[in-house]
Image: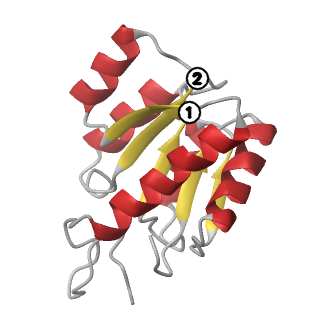
């Protein structure tokens, strides 16, 4: 992703979060990582005017308080947040979850592997895609995309 904007991870499983951070570090992703344990905390973070808007949200579905689908709906219904790409990264392979997430505007849906090497390859693929992907301008007056490559 290669810019200074944070990546927001919304996931209640600390082991998965540590694996994601490690895989990003191994892939050379140096974006700051912000972690929130559920959808409520993540929405509060995103709506805080002092927060830096993330270039990407990695979202788990199975969480307490506000699950991933509820969070995704709230983000995509919010005029100021809807352009932030949300990539679902979860253990749920239920077809109904896949369909619902895409209907709500998810940018992608990927399964978490319990095998670190496979999980690391998924994170590398995410990095490659979002490094070269063109995205809507996140802040008026800037010329880089949401997760544009800086270098």
Residue behind mark 2 = 91
| Mark closer to the chain start, 1 or 2 | 1
Disc number for residue 85 = none
Q: Residue at 34% x, 39% y: name it.
A: 108
Disc number for residue 60 = 1
Write down the quadrant of residue 145 in the picture: bottom left
Residue 8 coordinates in the image, percent (x, y): 55, 56
- Residues under labels 1 and 2: Cα distance? 8 Å
Towards the viewer: 27 or 80: 27
Q: Residue at 36% x, 69% y: name it.
A: 131
Residue 27 coordinates in the image, percent (x, y): 59, 65
Which circle, 1 or 2, is nearer the viewer? 2
- CB-based contact (under 8 Å), mark 1 and mark 2: yes
Residue 33 coordinates in the image, percent (x, y): 63, 64
Write down the quadrant of residue 32 in the picture: bottom right
- Count the marks: 2
Q: Residue at 45% x, 61% y: name it.
A: 127
């Amino acid at each position: 992703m290669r810019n200074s904007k944070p990546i927001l991870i919304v996931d209640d499983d600390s082991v998965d979060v540590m694996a994601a951070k490690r895989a990003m570090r191994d892939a050379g992703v140096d974006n700051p990582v912000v972690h929130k344990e559920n959808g409520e905390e993540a929405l509060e973070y995103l709506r805080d005017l002092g927060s830096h808007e993330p270039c990407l949200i990695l979202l788990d579905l199975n969480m307490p308080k506000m699950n991933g689908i509820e969070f995704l709906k709230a983000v995509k219904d919010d005029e100021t947040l809807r352009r932030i790409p949300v990539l679902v990264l979860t253990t749920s392979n239920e077809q109904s979850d896949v369909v619902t997430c895409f209907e709500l505007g998810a940018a992608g849906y990927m399964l978490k592997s319990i095998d670190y090497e496979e999980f690391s390859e998924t994170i590398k693929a995410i990095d490659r895609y979002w490094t070269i992907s063109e995205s809507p301008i996140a802040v008026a007056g800037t010329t880089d995309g949401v997760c544009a490559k800086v270098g």
